[in-house]
Amino acid sequence: MSAAEDTEVKIPPGREFQLPTDPDHLWDGLQDVGLGIRWVAEVKKADMQIELSGPKWEYKSYTILEVIEDPNQVRDGIVTLIGPDIHEVEPGTSAPSAWEIKVYGPGITQRHREYVERQMAMALHGIEGYMAFGSFQAPWMRISKAVVGRLTFAKLCQVVHAYVKTVVPQVEKMEFRWIVATPEVGGLDLILPLYKRGIERLKAQEQSVALEDEDVDIFYGCTICKSLAPNHVCAITPSQIPYCGILSYNGAQVTVELDPEGYIFPMPKGECRDPDLGSYTGVDEAVYERSNHQVKRVNIFSAIRYPTTNCGCFEGAAFYIPEVDGLGLAIRRYIGVTPLGIKFSRLAGMISGGSQNHGYKGISLRSMQSKTFLKGDGGWNRIVWMPADMKQEMAEYIPEEVYDKIATEQDTIDPGELREFLKQKGHPIVERFWKNGEPQPLNLPPPGGDWPDE
């Protein structure tokens, strides 16, 4: 955060910690904390020492990584902690937060930001007693009581610092700042203005790649989540942002350049069968090989017919509502009930694991901004319901003629009432997908099944 922003928002004083910066000693002092893929796990509420962000705070927190061009503006290995440390709170404490990371390295540009973010995520997901879900714009973290006395916020930063410098040697400096906004620090009142500004900075960082799907012969695939969902494969195109929300086509391209043997791989798109559905022969071949020969075909731009698989890292989800033959949207921070009669947490559990679930597809806030968003299902003309705050956040991307016709939980969560709402509002779904003013529900195949007409 800049000095000007700190002046506008009064930040309480913090404590500074110095991490090892000598390449031979980056990992010193971490011997008492488990590191590696075996520690990837969920921390249950009953087992947590502290929770940062999450549904209790409507995900009003952020993590932001910024690439800094001036080396004098980054103090290598410095961690500033504002608020209590892990062992200084009562078990079960929950607070909104802000985590800011500055990175400098010769040759490291904004083009490399997403790659560095991914390495940071890889480091974090292998820390004993640490859990993280969501994107940098909506993180949800928990730390287990089992690591109290061994893990601190400075050590969390040290793992990231050591790992990133090890796998991305071009990075020379990293500086960190945590704000753990417990009530005595300022709580949500402190975080909200920082959050709003942080989201603006995140959006400003996102590069608009002047490419269309038709302009390239190579898409990219991602299999980083196969440890949690063995048959899962993501497909990334210039217009298709993965539902984790933290990787773009540009980011995938850079990742392959820097790590050609890693979890991101080139995916020749092959022949285009259907540009609206996003059906490509090359994508199907790659997904089939990388999914342990379980998923034979995918439509990149559809949630209904042969959607891409879901691992569990999605920010949100699109779901089919048979009573209205339409699609609803929900995001992880929404804690109410959907028109399916269940909350997002149960919905997410139903569709995770890497199977192909017809009628369900993970989404991210960034993917909703694309002109190909659920294009194969009718795009926004098929969206009939979404949480009110999500609708407001996406207002500039929703066609004006549809915006007021999409229901929210403030209108109804009852499918019958939703059908009447859509009729009264004159939603495009009534004319384009219903017959004689009545919805025609689809008989969705079971997970992994085929549509009978194909």
Image (cartoon, rainbow, N blue to C red):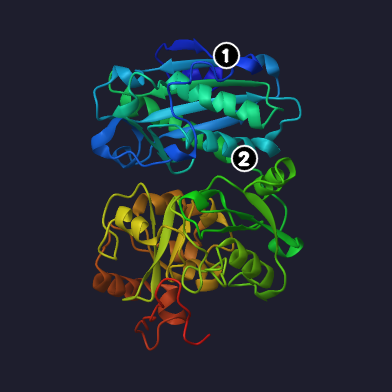
Give the secondary structure at mark 1: loop
Q: Which mark is residue 114?
A: 2
On the image, numbered disc 1 is attached to which residue? Answer: 20
Q: Nearer the viewer, residue 347 or 125?
A: 125
Tell me which amino acid carries mark 2.
Glu
| Label 2–label 1 contact, CB within 8 A | no
Question: Measured along the vertical axis of the image, is residue 18 above or below residue 300?
Answer: above
- The residue drawn where x is 37% and y is 59% is 386
Classify residue 355 by image quadrant.
Answer: bottom left
Cα separation, mark 2 vs mark 1, equals: 25 Å
Q: How many marks?
A: 2
The numbered mark, 2 or 1, whose residue comes first in the sequence reads 1
Q: Nearer the viewer, residue 362 or 160?
A: 160
Q: Is residue 348 left or right of residue 201?
A: left
Q: Nearer the viewer, mark 2 or mark 1?
A: 1
Q: In the figure, 388 relative to 442: above or below?
A: above
